[in-house]
């Protein structure tokens, strides 16, 4: 193993760690990524990439590859005691990707690994972190290779992406706050013989029993079953056990015809007390774990990596002060708190057993969940396009365009009649300064970290609530860093410099 100094050492080569490695490598940062496993994961595990993650993967240029490997699920349905209480459609989502892409975790990892290799960085498997020591200007990390030999890696920074049982988190002595749910789950990839649409998501609730069906390509489904029996079943998950759950929580006559893989797990709802400590950062499951409800886990970790990646690269390259890295924890911690709180609440409502409570769910929920504002809020949350760093709530309301919010996309009319997207005009690695409407484009005073784009289209002015024109500075991760309705660039240059020095 190479013992040279590296800028960043990433521990863990799941989707989160690989996303982080790609973000750094495409900016020219010397990066090593290690993983204790013998090789890449080949199991389905997490399933589903949300709209916001697809938007961000677009900046790495890999979204089309992911789309080719997944199934676009636009509709999800929820039934309570055989009565439908929710039917929601992503079709109206304000994103270029108005669906949930049902793609297994291992497929996401394959795409990310190949892209990383093309950038010149390869995952080092069977390399285990043993101990880390922080110093004033670097981190020393003792690792053990596949032959048992040891090495001390000297890195400027370390990123722990090593999952719920994170060795990096333990070495840092950070507490994992929260508690385990009592409910146990069985999961399996299988084929169903039933009359329901094959490309829609279904969840069936029945007095504490819960079965969710996530569609996949080629007629497969991922099924998640809440274990109702006490004590919870142990040992291998059998087809007979799964069929008994289907008999209770699916349309009459639904039958499992084939099981590909199956396993058990317990839901935990935890978040780390701090996302960073000194020169170390935690991302993904190392920082937060929660329910399978909403397919949020893998996506939240991926978005942790996009938030931290450009900031760490800017500091390593000397383009930003180290204080910029403090914004990672400040921005992502509220998102993790909101996620853990929300999934805990939804999971408890899903697993209600009391007859009075389940009757209320069956009779009241359909009227509430059918309302358009409720569905819009729900879909924005599930797709994660509502994630915001504007304040400590972790989310933004529909229609708001404020500093810290996700920069919305706009369809632009091309001269030849073909349309394009505002997202396509954003620089994939740098800040982008939009000059909108009648505002005067800035001259050459902009720093190299900023790409300047002029957009003279009413739809953009309307979307960004700048009817008379103005400026919007969009971060490399697609969030608004600065917004002004002034049309003279003089003060804008000063404000942009300030924002780069003390960004959102």
Image: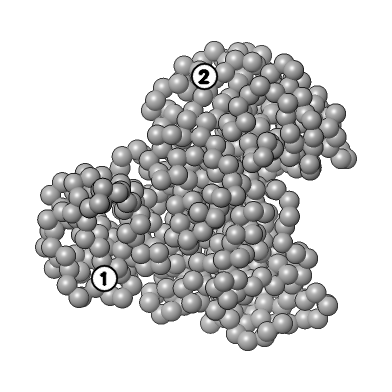
Residue located 55% across and 44% down the image: 101
Give the image quarter of residue 371. top left
Which colouring convention does the figure follow?
one colour
**Residue tagged 1:** 497
Residue 235 image offset from top left, x and y in percent? 88, 40
Q: Categorize mark 2 by other alpha carbons within 10 Å: few (<14), some (14-19), many (20+).
A: some
Q: Is residue 490 visible?
A: yes
Q: Is residue 82 above or below residue 22?
A: above
Residue located 26% across and 44% down the image: 463
In the rendered view, does 115 fall on the left or right side of 39? left
In the rendered view, does 379 fall on the left or right side of 190? left
Residue 378 image offset from top left, x and y in percent? 46, 33
- Residue placed most toward the observer, 256 or 78: 256
Q: Secondary structure at mark 2?
A: helix
Q: Is residue 93 above or below residue 10?
A: above
Residue 189 image offset from top left, x and y in percent? 73, 39
Report the quarter where the N terminus lies: bottom right
**Residue tagged 2:** 365
Q: Which mark is residue 210?
A: none
Residue located 67% across and 40% down the image: 218
Give the image quarter of residue 478. bottom left
Report the quarter where the C terminus lies: bottom left
Q: Categorize mark 1 by other alpha carbons within 10 Å: few (<14), some (14-19), many (20+).
A: few
């Amino acid at each position: 193993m190479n013992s040279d100094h590296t800028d960043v050492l990433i521990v863990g080569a799941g989707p989160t760690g690989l996303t982080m490695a790609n973000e750094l490598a495409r900016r020219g940062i010397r990066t090593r990524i290690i993983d204790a496993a013998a090789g890449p994961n080949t199991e389905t595990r997490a399933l589903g990439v949300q709209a916001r993650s697809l938007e961000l993967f677009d900046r790495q240029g890999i979204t089309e590859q992911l789309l080719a490997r997944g199934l676009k699920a636009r509709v999800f349905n929820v039934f309570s005691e055989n009565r439908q209480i929710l039917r929601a459609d992503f079709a109206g989502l304000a994103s270029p990707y108005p669906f949930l892409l049902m793609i297994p975790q291992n497929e996401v990892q394959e795409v990310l690994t190949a892209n990383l290799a093309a950038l010149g960085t390869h995952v080092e498997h069977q390399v285990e972190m043993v101990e880390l020591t922080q110093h004033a200007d670097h981190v020393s990390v003792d690792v053990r290779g596949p032959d048992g030999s040891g090495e001390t890696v000297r890195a400027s920074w370390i990123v722990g992406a090593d999952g719920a049982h994170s060795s990096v988190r333990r070495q840092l002595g950070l507490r994992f706050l929260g508690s385990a749910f009592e409910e146990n789950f069985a999961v399996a990839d299988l084929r169903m013989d039933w009359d329901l649409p094959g490309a829609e998501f279904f969840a069936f609730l029945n007095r504490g029993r819960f079965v969710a069906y996530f569609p996949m390509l080629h007629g497969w489904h991922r099924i998640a079953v809440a274990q109702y029996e006490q004590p919870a079943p142990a040992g291998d998950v059998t087809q007979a056990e799964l069929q008994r759950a289907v008999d209770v929580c699916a349309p009459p006559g639904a039958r499992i015809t084939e099981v590909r893989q199956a396993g058990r797990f317990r839901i935990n709802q935890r978040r780390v007390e701090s996302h960073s400590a000194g020169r170390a950062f935690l991302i993904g499951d190392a920082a937060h774990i929660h329910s399978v409800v909403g397919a949020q886990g893998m996506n939240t970790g991926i978005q942790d990596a996009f938030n931290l990646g450009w900031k760490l690269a800017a500091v390593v390259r000397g383009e930003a002060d180290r204080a910029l890295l403090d914004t990672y924890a400040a921005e992502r911690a509220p998102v993790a708190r909101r996620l853990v709180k929300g999934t805990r609440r939804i999971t408890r409502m899903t697993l209600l057993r009391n007859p009075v409570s389940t009757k209320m769910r069956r009779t009241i929920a359909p009227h509430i969940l059918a309302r358009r504002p409720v569905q819009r809020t729900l879909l924005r949350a599930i797709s994660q396009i509502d994630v915001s760093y504007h304040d400590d709530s972790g989310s933004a309301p529909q229609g708001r365009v404020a500093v810290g919010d996700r920069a919305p996309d706009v369809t632009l009319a091309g001269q030849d009649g073909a349309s394009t997207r505002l997202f396509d005009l954003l620089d994939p690695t740098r800040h982008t300064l939009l000059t909108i409407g009648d505002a005067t484009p800035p001259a050459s005073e902009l720093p190299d970290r900023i790409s300047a784009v002029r957009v003279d289209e009413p739809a953009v002015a309307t979307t960004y609530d700048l009817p008379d024109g103005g400026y919007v500075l969009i971060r490399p991760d697609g969030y608004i860093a600065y917004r002004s309705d002034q049309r003279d660039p003089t003060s804008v240059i000063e404000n942009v410099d300030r924002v780069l020095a003390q960004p959102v």
